[in-house]
Image (tube, rainbow, N blue to C red):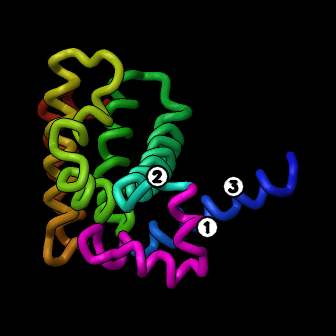
Amino acid sequence: MNKNVARGQATRAHLIDVATRLFTERGYDGTSIEAVLAESGVSRGSLYHHFPGKEALFWAVLEGVATRVGEELAAATRDIQDPVAALRAECLAWIRLAGDPVVQQTALIDAPAVLGWQRWRELDEQGSLDTFAHIVLAATYEVALMIARAEDPAPALSAGESAMADFLDRLLGAPG
């Protein structure tokens, strides 16, 4: 790889790291391109070379968050052979991730507003899901949104995790 390409990739990654931190701390509306430029030390031209605007930068941040979430959900189910146990583990892992400030602010609070509800929902509905899977996904997201919007996320996380476990027990039967 030539030095210019490597430098460009490093600049892009640096901008995403800085934007991730700022979007998490200040939210989408509270983060300006000027703040990203000031924090990153990158020129305006360089930022716009990589991202045509703030929404594109947010999208790159969201893609990074989604990748991390996907990796953590996969890790939660990696050694589970039983599909019901895997579903249970993945739902509970997602609820726990709702307690992560980066996931809360970018994926659960800002993404629906920035992308629009329909586009946000389509992110997780890629692939064919049957009606049952939509119901479970909807319940899991509602609990995650409750946690993300709570004044005090710690008790909301505990209550949400307990409620999701109870919901899955009632729906699927208690784990055996």
Residue 58 seen in the figure: yes
Cα distance in 3D space between marks 1 and 3: 9 Å
Q: What element does badge 1 sit on?
A: helix
Give the crowd class for mark 1: few <14, some 14-19, many >=20 residues within 10 Å. Answer: some
Residue 143, labelled with which disc?
A: none
Name the residue furthest right. 2
Where, quadrant-wise, is the C terminus in this rendering? Answer: top left
Q: What element does badge 2 sit on?
A: helix
Q: Residue at x 49, y 30 (%)?
A: 80
Cα distance in 3D space between marks 3 and 2: 13 Å
Q: Main secondary structure of the magenta part?
A: helix
Total marks placed: 3
Stretch in magenta: 23-49
Read off the residue under disc 3. Answer: 9
In-front residue for pair 122/43 = 43
Q: Residue at x 35, y 19 (%)?
A: 127
Q: Residue at x 29, y 52 (%)?
A: 95
Q: What element does badge 3 sit on?
A: helix
